[in-house]
Amino acid sequence: MLGSFAYKKIPPKENVIFRVVKTIKTALVNKFRKGAPKRAHWLDHSLDKHSCATDVKCNDAQTKPFYTSLCLEARFVEDVKSLIRVLIMMLPVPFFWSLYDQQGSRWVIQAVAMDGQITDNFALLPDQMATLNAILIMTFIPIFQFLIYPGVEKMGIRTHYLRRMVVGGFLAAMAFVISGFVQIGVNQTLPDIPKNDVAFVSLINSYGSNCNVAFNIPGASQTILPRNTSLIDNKVEKIQTLLRLKPNTYLIQITSTGDCQGNQGAITLTTNFEGGKSYYVAATPQGVFYDSTKWDKPTEGQGESSLRMTLLSPCNTIVNSTVRSWGCNDSSDTSSYFGRIALCRYNPENIEHPCDPRDTSKYFYYAWKSEGDDYKRIPVYDYNGGGNVKANGTAYDFIDMKPGIYKAYYVNYLLGDSDRTPAKEEIAVVEIPGSTFQITGMGGVYSLIILKNGQVSSNTPASNVLSIYTIVPRNHLSIMWQIPQYIVITAAEILFSITGLEFCYSQAAPSMKSVLQAAWCFTVALGDLIIIIIAELSLFPNLAIEMFAYACGMLVVIFIFALMSIFYYEYVDYTAAEDEAVSDLIPKEPSLQTVSKHIDNESDASMHL
């Protein structure tokens, strides 16, 4: 910008792209016209009906005393021929962009399933890894220009444009091979998804005391769980304990032995498991219940884990009458509290306002609106030795939470519900005793159960029992494993993209440079279109297979490009033509010799007249 005053700004006289299209159209029409003469090149047919004597541009050029050139239209046709040759060499370029641009799509998806925690106080988010490409490219440009290219030249190997682009294409394929192997490691932390003919079932013993719970399910072996344990699948630790059952209705016999707060004997729970879904069956001091769950890891890419809270806190055991008014029907109700709940990051220095709704990084809450929206009531079956007494627990929906230490609070909006987020002074909060828990790592899926000791039919106040269970393990593979593929794809960008721009500019005729620059940008759009088409077709259920498929496709394309470079394309030098074009465009004062010659010619002409 500061040096723009030193440039001569010549306004464009015509749309070159439209003129190129018109020339090609005229050539094709004339070529297939009946009785058309044979030409050395099919584009020469655009001159079949051309005559410099009647062409305005040619006549205008010939009247300029200081302009000497061939027929302008014939010269333009030659430029279009050179354009076609370069465009043919650009045919494989879109596939390179289909790989390169996946840094912002597939590679981010891959990073979402990786562990970005670098130190205790520093984490890399998935989309932040893309900044590595920008840093590397600024570092690599001088390294390639001043070290690698001259070093290879000294070894006797010419590093002309097409050779660099071929090497860049192979490096792009290599980057996706590396990415594919990284994805294989990532897949080890991804949960198995139940197919339509099977249901996954986890069993949970949420007793805090020394109580063993035995689960007897028809068609499956007996499972005995000690206190505060559950069934889980963990590919990294090679653990696979989840039950895989056929879709059906099951009568599950649950037997408690040991210190079970008076809950002795057996209870039968009727369950209905559907195919393609996942469930958990929980035995708690209050009773037994089951519900469906999800296996989807968080996809926002903010370093979060997903958590669902189930509250088994009967209203008749909540001492604070104000809290009961926020989410209970009456004080004797054995159903659980169903009002608003907040999960707030623990801050020992902020005692007066532990929850701040406007601080989204520290305040997470389950907003109660209507049943079936943010929460649902689940039946809890009490141990009573006879017919089961039915009460309701409250299962809040899943939310995504960042790592940290949290406490759970009963919450009431003092100004009522509205679309506006209230300030911390506009809410009343009461801590749920014994509800402190910690979220570690990224990408895990957890179930948090807060309940009371004792049976739901009891009016005796009891302490809270908090249990948190892993549904899907957190991400284990470090995001740092993506660094090699970023290094390789950046080197590929230097060799292919930057060199490709140099190739287009140097091999374009002076009048075609803007057209080729536009064509190069168009290849980027075509590459993104390839990504969209492949994604919409859903050809690859496994992301690792998709990475390898892209790598194989790039190898095939770059091999064809190498053959074209060897057997098809010949380099041209437009240096002299560029000098002539610049000389033609920039007005210059004629020399004395030229002026004298021009005056003599005019004198001779007047004498002849």
Image (cartoon, rainbow, N blue to C red):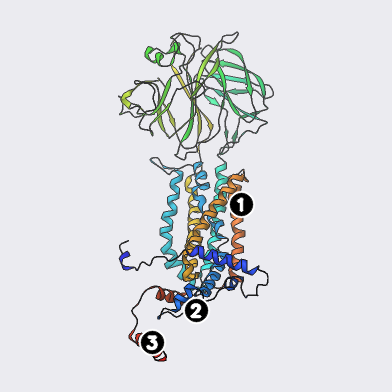
**Could you tell me how far apart the alpha carbons at marks 2 and 1 are, in whole angstroms?**
51 Å
Residue 345: horizontal and vertical position, in percent? 38, 30
Find disc 2 in the rendering and name its residue.
70
Q: Secondary structure at mark 3?
A: helix
Question: In the drawing, does residue 361 fall left or right of residue 224?
Answer: left
Q: Secondary structure at mark 2?
A: loop
Closer-to-camera residue (38/409):
38
Of marks 1 and 3, which one's residue comes earlier in the chain?
1
Give the mark toward the camera: 1 or 3.
Answer: 3
Check residue 31 in the rendering and tell me which mark sits there, or answer none: none
- 99 up-or-down from 471: above or below: below
Single out the residue that lies furthest toward the front.
609
- 306 up-or-down from 37: above or below: above
| Quadrant in which the C terminus is drawn | bottom left
Of marks 2 and 1, which one's residue comes earlier in the chain?
2
Of marks 2 and 3, which one's residue comes earlier in the chain?
2
Question: In the drawing, does residue 79 fall left or right of residue 128?
Answer: right
Residue 303: horizontal and vertical position, in percent? 45, 39
Closer-to-camera residue (402/323):
323
Amino acid beneath label 2: Leu
Find disc 3 in the rendering and name its residue.
602
Find disc 1 in the rendering and name its residue.
549
- 369 up-or-down from 133: above or below: above
Question: In the drawing, does residue 596 fall left or right of residue 80?
Answer: left
| Quadrant in which the N terminus is drawn | bottom left
